[in-house]
Image: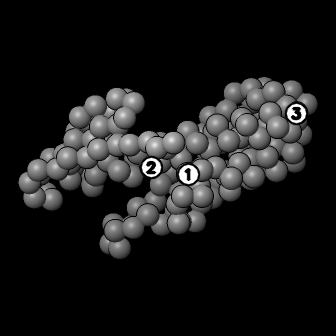
Amino acid sequence: MKRTAKAHWTGTLKEGQGKISTQSTVLNDTQYSFKTRFADGVGTNPEELIAAAHAGCFTMAVGAALTQAGFTPGDLETEAILDLDMIGLSITGIHLELKASAIEGVSNDKFQEVAAGAKSGCIISKALNVPITMTATYGA
């Protein structure tokens, strides 16, 4: 299976503009630029897209792991917080903030075990070569 995305860029780094599109067309000539990446411009940026991909992958992995452990996943919500070193121009880490509720019969210890396994087993986690941390909160 292959998944694709395309990017097009025209111009210099600071004055140029680009467009990003995905195979699914969820992003279809979505604008990105220096301002959307390093300031407060309207559009997206590669780091935001990595964070979104990681949040989605990890949340699905938690749901799958809970199901495999015999629990019915309730509400799962993850925020992925990506740290970008502006001096070294590198991603220095990603913190996953998972909030879960309504998982009948799961103890907090088991929930923490499942979430930790999902963090290391998530396809995006495995693809990234940066420290990935996580906080998992269970409760209403």
- Circle 2 crowding by C-alpha within 10 Å: few under 14, some 14–19, many from 20: some
Q: Distance from label 1 to label 3 (Cα)?
A: 24 Å
Question: In the current view of this chain or complex, which residue is farthest to the front?
Answer: 1
Residue at image mark 2: 50
**Does 67 sit left or right of 81 as displayed?**
right
Residue at image mark 3: 70
Identify the amino acid type marked 1.
Answer: Ile
Q: Distance from label 2 to label 3 (Cα)?
A: 30 Å
Position of the C terminus, as image quadrant, is top right
Q: Are marks 2 and 1 in contact (CB under 8 Å)?
A: yes
In the image, 9 versus 37, the foreground residue is 9
Of labels 1 and 3, earlier in sequence is 3
Of labels 2 and 1, earlier in sequence is 2
Q: Which mark is residue 124?
A: 1
Q: Distance from label 2 to label 1 (Cα)?
A: 9 Å
In the image, 125 versus 34, the foreground residue is 125
- Circle 3 crowding by C-alpha within 10 Å: few under 14, some 14–19, many from 20: few
How far across and down, in percent of the image, does residue 45 sit?
32, 47
Identify the amino acid type marked 2.
Answer: Ile
How far across and down, in percent of the image, does residue 97 sit?
61, 46
Q: Which mark is residue 2?
A: none
Q: Is residue 117 above or below residue 140?
A: below
Q: Secondary structure at mark 1?
A: helix
Identify the amino acid type marked 3.
Answer: Gly
The residue drawn where x is 34% and y is 29% is 25
Corner quadrant of residue 85: bottom left
Corner quadrant of residue 131: bottom right
